């Protein structure tokens, strides 16, 4: 048996020796979950859960697992740390009412019931919705396409903006969320599941069968190479006088490997320009510990006057 140093063992004990963090370890031991999943299960805010996960991650007890655009958390597979966590969880009473309730809610979420019944709202989602609703271009549109559907607030905004709304969801979970949100609010919304990993690809554009007065891209964290293709596809989905609303995290626009890093605002403008779009408005948004650029763009030929402005 490998002997553990005093400092390492104390670090593990301090990280795990807190009621909520012990619950998070038990949840992550059953299945990999996102921050949003965990927050709903334990009934705490996403920022608070994120802080607990950060402590557990820094101690080496859990690890981040990327699944497409989502980041999930699971128990570490590192030998000594994994052995410590498994031994700790083995001491827990599975009949404990709190842990049993957590398991039941996690199971309901896996089946889609929890998301369908109570979509998670967030400060970031409300901030994104506020940006869209404050834009002059959102005042009068006939048709709206929402791509992504990660934030229920934007689903409600898209469905309420025009007389016709379509949602292109990137996963079955997002599809269920969009349908439940629209149904709960009494909004008419056509929901489609993306045909493949390339969201808004040729097959999706063909299935939509029309162009839209407004396209909302709810796809935070899309890499540059995929973002350029997404902008080009969104440009094709726009009617001549339409507007594109988009949101992108700062970090995903910067390359840590590059010797000279292009400024996020300049890079976003450049990617839009390469797709035949002109930025009309751009604003930074900070909420829930995330830094996001929000922008409105128009097809270059349709932009009547003025220059892009930063709010």
Image: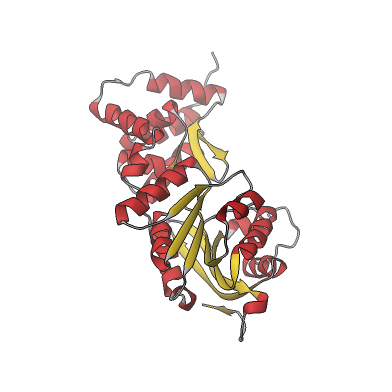
Residue furthest to the right? 259
Is 86 situated above or below 256? above
Is 247 situated above or below 81? below
User: Which residue is found at the position 33% from the left and 51% from the top?
Assistant: 183
Residue 254 position in % (x across, y down): 65, 58
User: Which residue is found at the position 44% from the left and 63% from the top?
Assistant: 164
Quadrant of residue 251 in the image? bottom right
Residue 4 position in % (x across, y down): 51, 22
Residue furthest to the bottom? 305
Please give the count of numbered marks on the rendered protein: 0
Residue 178 position in % (x across, y down): 42, 50
Residue 139 position in % (x across, y down): 43, 76
Is 238 situated above or below 224? below
How is the protein colored in the picture?
secondary structure
Residue furthest to the left? 97
> Is residue 51 among what the camera can see?
no
> Is residue 178 among what the camera can see?
yes
Residue furthest to the front? 209
User: Which residue is found at the position 39% from the left and 33% from the top?
Assistant: 111
Q: Is residue 225 left or right of residue 210?
A: right
**Of residues 22 and 128, which is closer to you in this image?**
128
**Of residues 186 and 115, which is closer to you in this image?**
186
Quadrant of residue 87 in the image? top left
Check the picture and name the quadrant holding the N terminus: top right
């Amino acid at each position: 048996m490998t002997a553990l140093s005093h400092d390492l063992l104390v670090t593990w004990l301090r990280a795990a020796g807190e009621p909520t963090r012990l619950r998070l370890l038990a949840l992550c031991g059953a299945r990999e979950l996102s921050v949003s999943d965990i927050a709903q299960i334990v009934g705490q805010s996403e920022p608070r859960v994120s802080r607990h996960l950060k402590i557990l991650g820094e101690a080496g007890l859990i690890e981040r697992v990327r699944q497409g655009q989502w980041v999930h958390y699971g128990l570490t597979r590192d030998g000594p740390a994994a052995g410590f966590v498994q031994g700790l969880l083995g001491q827990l009473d599975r009949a404990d009412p709190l842990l049993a309730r957590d398991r039941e809610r996690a199971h309901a979420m896996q089946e889609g019931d929890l998301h369908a019944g109570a979509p998670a709202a967030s400060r970031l989602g409300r901030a994104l919705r506020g940006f869209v609703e404050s834009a002059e271009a959102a005042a009068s549109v006939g048709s709206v396409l929402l791509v992504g559907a990660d934030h229920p607030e934007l689903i409600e905004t898209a469905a309420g903006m025009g007389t016709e709304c379509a949602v292109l969801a990137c996963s079955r979970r997002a599809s269920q969320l969009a349908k439940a949100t629209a149904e709960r609010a009494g909004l008419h919304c056509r929901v489609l599941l993306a045909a493949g990993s390339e969201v808004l690809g040729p097959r999706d554009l063909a299935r939509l069968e029309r162009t839209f007065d407004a396209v909302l891209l709810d796809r935070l964290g899309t890499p540059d190479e995929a973002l350029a293709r997404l902008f080009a596809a969104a440009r094709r989905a726009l009617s001549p006088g339409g507007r594109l609303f988009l949101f992108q995290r700062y970090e995903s626009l910067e390359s840590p490997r590059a010797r000279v890093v292009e400024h996020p605002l300049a890079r976003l403008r450049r990617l839009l320009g390469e797709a035949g779009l002109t930025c009309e408005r751009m604003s930074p948004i900070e909420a829930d510990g995330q830094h996001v650029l929000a922008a409105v763009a128009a097809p270059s030929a349709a932009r009547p006057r003025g220059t892009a402005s930063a709010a």
